Image (cartoon, rainbow, N blue to C red):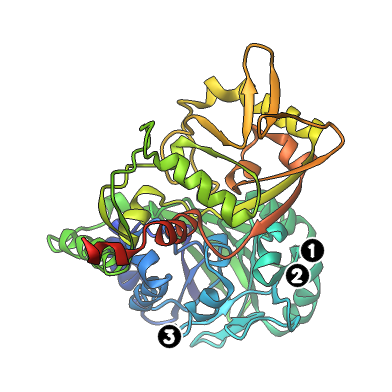
Amino acid sequence: MEKIRLLHTNDIHSHLEKWPKIRRFLQERQKTTGNESTLTVDLGDFCDRWHPLTEATDGKANTQLMKQAHYDATTIGNNEGIGNSKSQLNQLYKEADFPVILANLFDRSTLQLPEWANEHKIITTKEGTKIGLVGATAPFPLSYTPNGWDARNWSDILPNIVQFLRKKVDILVLLSHLGINEDRQIAKELPEFDVIIGSHTHHLFPNGEQVGNTLLAAAGRFGEYVGEVTLFLDDYHQLTKARADTFATEEMLSYPEDEAEVFHYTDKGKKLLQEKKVAWLPFNLGVDQQEHCLVDETLAAVKERGETEAAILNTGLFLDDLKKGVVNQDELHMILPHPMHLIRVTLKGSDVTRLILEMEKNRHFLRNYPIRGMGFRGKIFGQIVYSGIQYDETNHVVRWLNKAIDPQKFYSFTTVDHFMFIPFFPTIEIAGQTEFLFPEFIRTVLGDYLAKRYPLSVENKI
């Protein structure tokens, strides 16, 4: 009986403090004897630009780390696909020694898969068993499309691939960054998959989940677990049994030198970012200051980038002040670590009023509300702040540039895409015409604005 081990990681999100343990664990489990074979795969979101080393290297350092663990294949998550510009993503895997399996992302200019992607991959074990790998990532057309990509639904892509590939392989595996609900649906509609290894929704299946004939596996988030699927096959390469397990990273062996390695990752990233000077501030910019306010400067930057008269942000985005003197990329990254893009939203005047009333209704609830995920890398949502929009709390009246709003006229404002993803302001998605502004993150927009308003050349004159 042949034994095949599928080791899998997912949604590590640049939690590199776990990496030394994970790497050792993978390397140890990759050792085989006799009729055993091992494949190691990652399900995407290995990168996350909250980490300074990922930010400083556009994720290329993460690719180098993956090479240490001898991955056989990976697919991408939204943090790779949306958290990078098109040119950055096209460079991300240039030095990879493993294939990227991705069937549902196409270049809009060519309508072909990107050069770095493979629709599928067939790997033959030493016992002659053929394993087919297919990859798919969560499609976010509002984000992918303006970035030059065409992300398609799995239902438009996978059935044809399965029909073609199933005849050629003994085992068929889906590397999924689609989420738990999609994985369950695929298992029902495409039972030809023997195994679906899942991610994206950060779900954990400690011992897998069986849906019909398909085994679902998933290993949580942030490198807290490593997963392993074990397949047993007879002499005719037919699957006789499958088992899924997960292993807690916290319980894995640690070495004294791990701490120094983890520190090196952060320190190297910060030093690279510190080398990139942006602006010279003649005064402190504080989050809570009335004069020289960081929030006000960012609102102005956001309006300028979006070419709108108004902007809306939340103070929880800002994790610290900016100090007087030279501003570098490391400081911008520390105060605004979120991989958030800007959106330009256009609404009728009546819907602008409705949106602001939604925000005012939620204001006190959100002020100390903890937010996690959806691009947010802070702690609490904080206060809602406007520029170009006024709200009369006594009379419940909304004004635009201190003038009455025309219910039938259209108005545009700029904010972060996070406001569209959270459930508190439905008017944006329901009634708004929304344009995603790529490729900059909000910290880049602020940096570009500060560079023009407070140029480094001033520093040399003082």
Please tell me how crowded label 3 is: few (under 14), some (14-19), or many (20+) other residues with Cα within 10 Å.
few
Residue 380 in sight here: yes
Q: Amino acid at mark 2?
A: Leu
Residue at horizontal 67%, vertical 64%?
Answer: 144
Single out the residue that lies furthest toward the right.
Answer: 408
Residue 201 in sight here: no
In 3D space, how far apart are the residues under numbered discs 1 and 2 (Cα atoms)? Answer: 6 Å
In 3D space, how far apart are the residues under numbered discs 3 and 2 (Cα atoms)? Answer: 28 Å
Vertical placement of residue 327 versus 374, above or below: below
**Element on which disc 3 rests:** loop
Between label 3 and label 2, give the one nearer the viewer.
Answer: 3
In 3D space, how far apart are the residues under numbered discs 1 and 3 (Cα atoms)? Answer: 32 Å
The residue identified by callout 1 is 155
Single out the residue that lies furthest toward the top.
Answer: 394
Q: Amino acid at mark 3?
A: Glu
Q: Which numbered circle lies on residue 95? A: 3
Mark 1 and mark 3 lie on one chain; the one further toward the N terminus is 3
The residue identified by callout 2 is 158
Q: Amino acid at mark 1?
A: Ser
Across and down, in percent, residue 254 comes to 20, 58
> Do the residues under discs 1 and 2 have CB atoms within 8 angstroms?
yes
Residue at horizontal 37%, vertical 32%?
Answer: 288
